[in-house]
């Protein structure tokens, strides 16, 4: 469904992605795991075509997207939806308008059909009663769930999540993980970026681990747990580290 | 010495880059006019917010400008016994220069910085990326609509400023200078030439373009979280004020070349 091969990207002066290759099969939930600043968000952005890589190939549903102009990228993006780290709900619109945004802008569906899709998506995330609220009136966990509802309502076949459980209490985090698992049983392809190991094990079919813009592991959750690669052990069990922290910590992040 | 020249060079390159990016943004915003989708509702909303929302400040600006011009003008004209012609002085200076420039500076403060901070906060909260992810061109949706609203509404606001300024002058002329109302208004209109009206409308349209585009540029190029939002807002106000004053000079010069 999605295949990255040999993707390199420099932002500003900093090489952020260094030869990233992995693929995501249709219907799979793939977790991209890594420390802050390792380049996870950037990977989602290149998949969406928000950044153009310097080198390498990115195929979405068989189509090479690195050479497309913004026009044609828009068409490819219709198959994908992203749940942003801070949800990125449009502040000036109500929850309903946020959720129906894509259908309303781009589809010829009737208002009733759209409204029904909005209701279903919000029910799925358990927020049907917030349709008329503004994003500012919602808590962080609720905003993320509305973000998921917006992604769902778009009818996309691929959902990308940036730190879906980041900054949430354990109950909300667990609720979000459940939603992701539930969606994977519906056959949606999902890419979940996180540094939260619990969440990763809960939702992943496959895990890719990134360190400083490089893939250091690509396999099953069991494979990750059993790995004795010191770099991987250092991430999944940092208590065992006695030195060498700087290998895992990334240079200070000017953007976040 | 060496570091000094190096700094100068990189600073210059920095400016050239800004000009390039700014021009590209203007081009994209204008291109957004000629191809669908047209965000009519968003444009009307912006016209309302930018245009109608600014009436109050331009009324105050016009009022005080006209009143102070009447007071100062009377002082200047008095030695020549020409106080009764104060309305000529008020209407020409307001229509040609003070109305467009003062209205634009006030609107740059209110509207330009508003555009900058709104887009900047959308940028830092990834809403701009979300727009792109949803298949919307953020420049067309946010910049083109605001550009249209500013270019249409700032001339209208300037006309209001001018009218109120001449009215403010009349209040002073009537109450303190004892000038006959009929005489005041006749000379006020008599003094305005056709070209003043043309210049008086071209200038605010250009200022509207500057206010909208500088605000959008500052917003779209925001970096670094909430601190960046504040910086962009301030930067847009300073830059658009300076560009308004500079382009006012250039336009005045240009129009003088065509008598
Ligand atoms: N627009 C940008 N300009 C310069 N550097 C950037 C930009 N975006 C991200 N980076 C850098 O790229 C690295 C990876 O960023 P990111 O993908 O956001 O990491 P993660 O999501 O894993 O925390 C960071 O070191 C960050 O500083
Ligand atoms: Mg990130």
Image (tube, coloured by chain):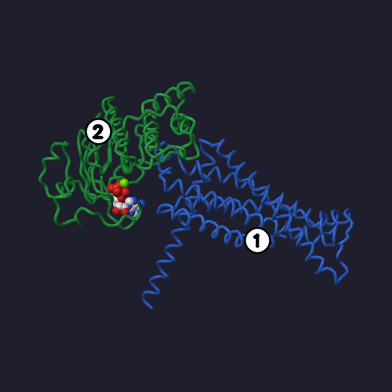
Name the residue tied to disc 2. A29
Callouts 2 and 1 close, C-beta under 8 Å: no
**What is the x, y in percent for residue B117?**
50, 50
Task: Tell me which corner region of the image, top left, top right, bottom left or bottom right, holds residue B3.
Answer: bottom left
Label 2 near ligand 1 (CB < 8 Å): no
Query: As displayed, is residue A124 above or below residue B115?
Result: above
Disc 1 secondary structure class: helix
Q: Badge 2: few (under 14), some or many (20 or more) residues near its Cα, within 10 Å?
A: many
Q: Which mark is residue B254?
A: 1
Q: Is residue B101 left or right of residue B225?
A: right
Q: Colour of chain B?
A: blue
Taking the spot 40% from the left edge, 44% from the top edge, the residue there is B126
Q: Is residue B206 left or right of residue B228?
A: right
Query: As displayed, is residue A234 above or below residue B244?
Result: above
User: A1 and A230: which one is in front?
Assistant: A230
Q: Chain of mark 1?
A: B
Name the quarter where the N terminus of chain A is drawn.
top left
Q: Colour of chain A?
A: green
User: B227 and B152: which one is in front?
Assistant: B227
* Marker count (numbered): 2
Q: Chain of mark 2?
A: A
Say if residue A66 shows up in the picture: no
**What is the x, y in percent for residue B253?**
66, 63
Query: As displayed, is residue A203 above or below residue A213?
Result: above
The answer for how far apart the CA atoms under marks 2 and 1 are is 64 Å
């Amino acid at each position: 469904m999605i295949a990255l091969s040999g993707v390199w990207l420099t932002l500003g002066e900093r090489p952020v992605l260094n030869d990233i290759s992995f693929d995501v099969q249709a219907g799979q939930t793939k977790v991209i795991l890594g420390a802050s600043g390792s380049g996870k968000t950037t990977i989602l952005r290149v998949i969406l075509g928000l950044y153009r890589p310097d080198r390498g190939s990115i195929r979405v549903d068989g189509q090479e997207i690195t050479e497309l102009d913004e026009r044609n990228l828009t068409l490819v993006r219709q198959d994908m939806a992203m749940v942003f780290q801070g949800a990125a709900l449009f502040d000036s619109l109500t929850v309903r308008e946020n959720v129906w945004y894509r259908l309303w802008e781009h589809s010829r569906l009737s208002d009733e059909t759209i409204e029904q899709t909005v209701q279903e998506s919000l029910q799925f995330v358990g927020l049907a009663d917030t349709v008329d609220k503004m994003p500012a009136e919602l808590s962080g966990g609720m905003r993320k769930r509305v973000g998921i509802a917006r992604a769902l309502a778009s009818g996309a076949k691929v959902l990308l999540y940036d730190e879906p459980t980041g900054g949430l209490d354990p109950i909300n985090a667990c609720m979000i993980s459940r939603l992701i698992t539930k969606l994977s049983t519906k056959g949606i392809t999902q890419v979940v970026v996180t540094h939260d190991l619990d969440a990763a094990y809960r939702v992943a079919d496959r895990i890719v681990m990134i360190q400083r813009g490089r893939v250091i592991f690509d396999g099953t959750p069991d494979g990750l747990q059993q790995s004795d690669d010191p770099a991987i052990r250092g991430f999944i069990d940092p208590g065992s580290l006695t030195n060498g922290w700087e290998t895992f910590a990334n240079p200070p992040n000017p953007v976040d | 010495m060496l570091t000094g020249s190096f700094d100068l060079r990189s600073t210059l390159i920095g400016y050239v880059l800004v000009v390039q990016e700014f021009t590209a943004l203007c081009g994209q915003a204008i291109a957004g006019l000629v191809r669908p989708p047209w965000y009519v509702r968003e444009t009307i909303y912006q016209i309302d917010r930018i245009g109608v929302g600014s009436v109050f400040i331009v009324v105050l600006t016009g009022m005080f400008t006209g009143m102070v011009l009447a007071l100062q003008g009377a002082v200047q004209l008095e030695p020549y016994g020409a106080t009764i012609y104060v309305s000529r002085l008020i209407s020409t200076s307001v229509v040609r220069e003070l109305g467009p420039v003062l209205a634009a500076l006030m609107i740059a403060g209110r509207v330009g910085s508003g555009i900058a901070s709104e887009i900047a906060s959308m940028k830092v909260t990834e809403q701009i990326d979300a727009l792109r992810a949803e298949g919307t061109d953020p420049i067309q949706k946010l910049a083109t609509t605001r550009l249209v609203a500013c270019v249409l509404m700032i001339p209208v606001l300037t006309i209001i400023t001018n009218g109120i300024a001449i009215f403010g002058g009349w209040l002073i002329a009537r109450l303190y200078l004892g000038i006959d109302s009929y005489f005041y208004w006749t000379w006020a209109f008599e003094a305005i030439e056709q070209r003043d009206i043309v210049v008086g409308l071209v200038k605010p349209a250009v200022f509207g373009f500057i206010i909208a585009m500088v605000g959008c540029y500052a917003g779209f190029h925001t970096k670094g979280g909430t601190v960046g939002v504040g910086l962009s807002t301030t930067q847009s106000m300073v830059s658009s004020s300076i560009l308004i004053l500079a382009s006012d000079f250039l336009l005045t010069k240009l129009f003088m070349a065509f008598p």
